[in-house]
Amino acid sequence: MKTTTLLAIGLLALSSLVVSACGTDAPATPSTDTDAGSSEETPGIACPPSGVSKGPWSLAMTRTSMKVRWEACRPGTNGALFVRPEAGGPERFYMHDAALTDLTPGTCYRYELGADRSLGGRFCTSQPDGGRVHWLTIGDTNALLGTSTRNVLEHNVPLGADFILHGGDIQYYKSVLETWAGWFPVMRPLLSLGAFQPALGNHERETPDELEDYSLRFFGDEAFGGRDMWYRFESGGVHFFVIDSDQPLAPSTTQGAWLTAALADAARAPGHRASIVVMHRAFMTCSDGDGLTDDRIAYASIFAQSKVALVIQAHIHGYERFEADGITYVTSGGGGGLLSEIDANASRAECAMRKAAGAFFHAVDFVVEGNQLTGKAIDDRGAVRDTFTVTLP
């Protein structure tokens, strides 16, 4: 049975002078999968009294704006969004399509849905130049495969990161256990923590319609560059470049040319402290997976010239950290998927550059203060399994 889902989108671009509200829900593309959204017409799946079937979550972080997105399963669902500064201050009321500008840089806010004020979360705008930048990295979140994802979130979400970098394989759609409808409740603590800035993995395209009907419907944004799956954002002078490792990546490709030019542009920007590249498939690994060795070598001089300090990877279900050509490579793919054989190819030449590794569930908490970047890999029991510091170039 086909079900039609309704997507309610709130664009937070708070204006002290003008608030324009559209206040209409736009139907999303119909899907043949009942997981696309609950419907009163779908047997066995009840639409909640609030009319909110998935979410909310935030995304598209800048210094003065944010988006909050959620999915509704009933026409006429209350589309109001309530926002207030997390540190205290007056509550403001916005319709879900209101365009709001002039949020305060480096400020965290709380938001609630008018449809059900128990549904809400937190977001933080990007930091001003030189500010403290705090984010959480996680990848390969097979959320319904046991309790590993829940346990990782339990020990990492309370650290209070300002935003999330997901390394891809957000959800395992073809898994017998996994559905998007089941994924959202498990991930709610993470989605309510801050802006969700994902790379796309191979599991975001497991069926012909998944990328458009699910992955991009839930997390796509103009920050992706239209239909292209790579984008950039910035906080505190730290520039992030999220790329699509399932598309051609070499510097000579369309994506590679964009990345090369964007890195150079960021390095010239006033207040630039460092650049960080985020991708799903790993440039280097000693595990049972393959690394993108040729691409890594091709980018070595480009990354050095553009002051890339860190490359964040996933895909390998475990943890690895390398130091190569003056750059730190961190693989964080321990978000809940079945763990990889992390030493299966330890004889590879690049493994001499590996500084830490382990097959364990985890996320990595990152903080940039001054010219120092610190990372802590924290497992599903709350133990710190690796810690390291990088001096920014």
Image (spheres, rainbow, N blue to C red):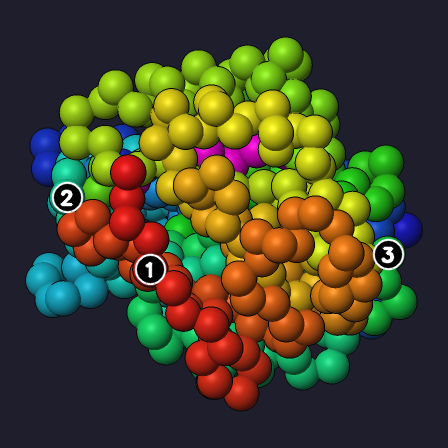
Name the amino acid type tagged 1: Thr
**In terms of sequence position, does the residue under pointer 1 or pointer 3 come before the other?**
3
* Most common secondary structure along the magenta stretch: strand
Q: Nearer the viewer, mark 2 or mark 1?
A: 1
Mark drawn on residue 389: 1
Q: Quick check: can you spot residue 109?
A: yes
Q: Quadrant of residue 150?
A: bottom right
Task: Please indicate whether residue 286 sits to the left or right of residue 355 in the image.
Answer: right
Q: Quadrant of residue 146?
A: bottom right
Name the amino acid type tagged 2: Gly
Q: Quick check: can you spot residue 335?
A: no
Question: Which residue is more in the foreground, 276 or 94?
Answer: 276
The x, y position of residue 70, in whole percent, is 51, 52
Give the spatial CA distance, label 1 vs label 3: 38 Å
**In terms of sequence position, does the residue under pointer 2 or pointer 3 come before the other?**
2
Q: Is residue 242 magenta?
A: yes
> Element type at marker 1?
strand
> Element type at marker 2?
loop
The magenta segment:
238-244
Task: Please indicate whether residue 3 sits to the left or right of residue 67 in the image.
Answer: right
Mark drawn on residue 130: 2
Q: Nearer the viewer, mark 2 or mark 3?
A: 2
Whether residues under marks 1 and 3 lie with C-beta atoms below 8 angstroms apart, the answer is no
Question: Which residue is more in the foreground, 329 or 379?
Answer: 329
Q: Which residue is identified by label 3?
A: 174
The x, y position of residue 336, in whole percent, is 68, 70
Name the amino acid type tagged 3: Lys
Give the spatial CA distance, label 2 vs label 3: 43 Å
Give the spatial CA distance, label 2 vs label 1: 18 Å
Q: Residue at x 86, y 42 (%)?
A: 207
The crowding category of the residue bearing disc 3, from other C-alpha atoms within 10 Å (few below 14, some 14 to 19, many at least 20), is few
Q: Quadrant of residue 121?
A: bottom left
